[in-house]
Each structure stands twice: as structure tokens, then as C-alpha cells.
Image (cartoon, grey):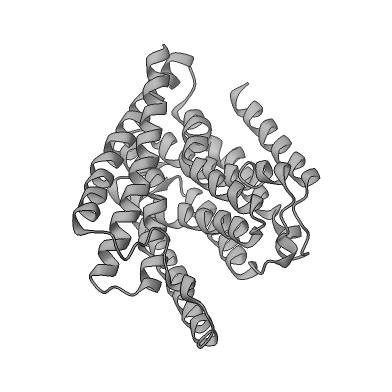
């Protein structure tokens, strides 16, 4: 029974490394082809960093394991707030009182409500996928417009780093770009296959549903990059990056991942999601109000509270 756990962890590691390789390759190829850095940052980097979650959800739909597909997104969004913001706060206070993330937070709440409304239909089908992707297109366009305004306002200032998307390397040779792309394109489906197949084996062995595995093992695993980014941002006192990383990731999970996955095949909604998990996700999202609107810092006390709530939620799922 150890082997499925080992293969699940291996699949997760391959997913995360392949996702990073794909981002590096795609970013540098796009810049070499003359695609503006702003567009690269808002699209390729956003898609690339969420590629592990996307591939896991698509593979789960193809394997007729909708609980893993939906649990991956709902569980990741809950973990992103309670765990990904809670753990770094235990290490150092995050000065979110200095951040202005109201607009993206509002978008995340609206996206969450839209997602719940579509889930109440009992299935994410083609129509739901088109609605979610349409909403994502609007969000990306709005971000693009805001970024253009910001760049125009900063004209003349020293903003060189603002134009450099994550993973950009102007000196990267063509063969390295090709290697990163191949590693990403081969590694992502390989890692997703290992993780989903073995997560399903673990679920059957322990007599739990695919939904539970999706909400726990898969969701926590695919949230590890966000956790690493947020811990580093907290230690560097970059609270804006930490909070923006979580809100942006949650937005893309809701609209992009399930939007694309539902075009591959219908995703049936387990009644348990509508009874508990979607409302826990929404409640966790609303817990950001003191930090976004009341300009409170995420102190160690808040970190303990967030982690304790997440531990309680995990216990309620598993016990």
C-alpha cells in the first residue's frame, strides 16, 4: 500500500517541476516572437503556473473521477486562504494593511458566487464552461487595461523590473527554450496521470470517495507552489505579493481550470460539495475582508486561527 503513496508524491513532484519548466519555456519563446511582456505576464504565466491543477482536473474528468477534478479546485481555494496565508503568518506578520487588493478581491468573491450558482445545477457542462471562461476573459481584459494605465502612469520612472514577467531570461538560447517546453509538455500529463491514478487507488483502499482525496491529498499537493511563494514573500515583507498571489490563484482556479475541464467532459457535482465544501470555500474567502477592507495585518494570532480552522476542516472531512 506504500507504492501508490510514493507514486502520488512522484507525480506531484513531476507536475510542479514540469509546470515551472513550461512557464520558463513559454515565456521566453513568446518574448522572442515579439509578444509584449504585459500580455505574457497576464496570460502565459497565469496559465503556466496553474498548469498542474489544470492537468489534474482534465485527467480526472477523462478518468471519470469528477470528485478529484472538483475537489482539487475547491480544496485548493480553501487551502490557499487558510493554509497558504496561515502558515507564513506564523513565521512573520504580513503587513497587508499597506496593500490595495479590493478590486481583485471583489472579483474573486463574484467568481465564487458564480461558481456556486453553476454548481447548484448539479453538473458543470459545456454551457457552464463557456460562462466561466467568458468571465475569465473579462477578468484578464480588465487586468490588462489596469496594467496599461499603471504603466502609463509610471512612464519616465525606473520600472524596468515591472516589464519582466516571471521566468524571463533575454539571454536564454533557443535549445534551452525547446528543452523547457518539451519537459513541460511531456512532464505535465505524465505527472497528472501518476497523481490521479494513484490517488484513486488510495481512495478505494481506504474506503473514501474521490471527492475526499481531491479535497485533501490532491488539493494540498497542488497548493504547494503558492505556499512556497507566499512564505518567501512574507519573509521578504512583500505582503502585496503574498495576498495577490492567493487571490489571483483562486480566481484562475474557479474560472479557468473548471472552465477548461468542463469542455473536456461533464463534471458531476457531488451533493456533499453543495452541503459543506463550497460554503467553507466561500466562508474562507470572506475571512479576507479584515485584511482587504479594514486594512488589518495578518499577525501570528491570525495565522494560528487560520491554520486551526483548516485543521478542523480537514478533521471533519477525514473523520
Q: Residue 66 at x, y = what percent?
A: 39, 37
Q: Residue 133 at x, y = what percent?
A: 38, 61
Q: Residue 64 at x, y = what percent?
A: 32, 33
Could you tell me which residue is drawn at 58 percent across and 46 percent down?
A: 80
Against 2, is 37 above or below? below
Against 126, is 199 above or below? above
The residue positioned farthest toward the top in the image shown: 1
The residue positioned farthest toward the front in the image shown: 171
Could you tell me which residue is drawn at 46 percent across and 52 percent down?
A: 253
Could you tell me which residue is drawn at 41 percent across and 52 percent down?
A: 49
Foreground residue among 279 and 58: 58
Can residue 269 be seen from the camera position used here? no
Can residue 318 be seen from the camera position used here? yes
Residue 255 shown left or right of residue 101 in the figure: left
Residue 12 shown left or right of residue 240 in the figure: left
Residue 134 shown left or right of residue 174 in the figure: right
Q: Quadrant of the N terminus?
A: top left
Q: Quadrant of the C terminus?
A: top right
Could you tell me which residue is drawn at 71 percent across and 52 percent down?
A: 287
Total number of numbered discs in the rendering? 0
Foreground residue among 207 and 156: 156
Foreground residue among 123 and 159: 159
Q: Residue 279 at x, y = what percent?
A: 63, 45
Amino acid at each position: 500500500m506504500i507504492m501508490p503513496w510514493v507514486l502520488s508524491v512522484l507525480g506531484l513532484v513531476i507536475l510542479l517541476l514540469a509546470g515551472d519548466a513550461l512557464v520558463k519555456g513559454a515565456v521566453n519563446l513568446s518574448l522572442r516572437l515579439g509578444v509584449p511582456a504585459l500580455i505574457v505576464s497576464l496570460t502565459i504565466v497565469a496559465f503556466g503556473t496553474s498548469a498542474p491543477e489544470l492537468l489534474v482536473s482534465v485527467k480526472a474528468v477523462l478518468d471519470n473521477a469528477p470528485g478529484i477534478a472538483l475537489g482539487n479546485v475547491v480544496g485548493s481555494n480553501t487551502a490557499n486562504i487558510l493554509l497558504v496565508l496561515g502558515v507564513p503568518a506564523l513565521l512573520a506578520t504580513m503587513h497587508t494593511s499597506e496593500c490595495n487588493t479590493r478590486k481583485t478581491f471583489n472579483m474573486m468573491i463574484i467568481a465564487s458566487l458564480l461558481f456556486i450558482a453553476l454548481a447548484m445545477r448539479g453538473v458543470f457542462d459545456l454551457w457552464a464552461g463557456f460562462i466561466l471562461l467568458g468571465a475569465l476573459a473579462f477578468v484578464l481584459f480588465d487586468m490588462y487595461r489596469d496594467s496599461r494605465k499603471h504603466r502609463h502612469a509610471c512612464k519616465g520612472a525606473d520600472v524596468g523590473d515591472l516589464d519582466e514577467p516571471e521566468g524571463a531570461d533575454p539571454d536564454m538560447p533557443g535549445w534551452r527554450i525547446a528543452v523547457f517546453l518539451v519537459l513541460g509538455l511531456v512532464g505535465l500529463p505524465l505527472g497528472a496521470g501518476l497523481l490521479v491514478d494513484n490517488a484513486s487507488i488510495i481512495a478505494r483502499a481506504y474506503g473514501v470517495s474521490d471527492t475526499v482525496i481531491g479535497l485533501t491529498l490532491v488539493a494540498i499537493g497542488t497548493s504547494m507552489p503558492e505556499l512556497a511563494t507566499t512564505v518567501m514573500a512574507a519573509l521578504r515583507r512583500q505582503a502585496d505579493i503574498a495576498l495577490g498571489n492567493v487571490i489571483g490563484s483562486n480566481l484562475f482556479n474557479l474560472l479557468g481550470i473548471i472552465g477548461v475541464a468542463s469542455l473536456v467532459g461533464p463534471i458531476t457535482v457531488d451533493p456533499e460539495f453543495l452541503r459543506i465544501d463550497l460554503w467553507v470555500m466561500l466562508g474562507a474567502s470572506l475571512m479576507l475582508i479584515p485584511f482587504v477592507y479594514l486594512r488589518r495585518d495578518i499577525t501570528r494570532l491570525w495565522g494560528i486561527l487560520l491554520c486551526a480552522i483548516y485543521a478542523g476542516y480537514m478533521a471533519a472531512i477525514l473523520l
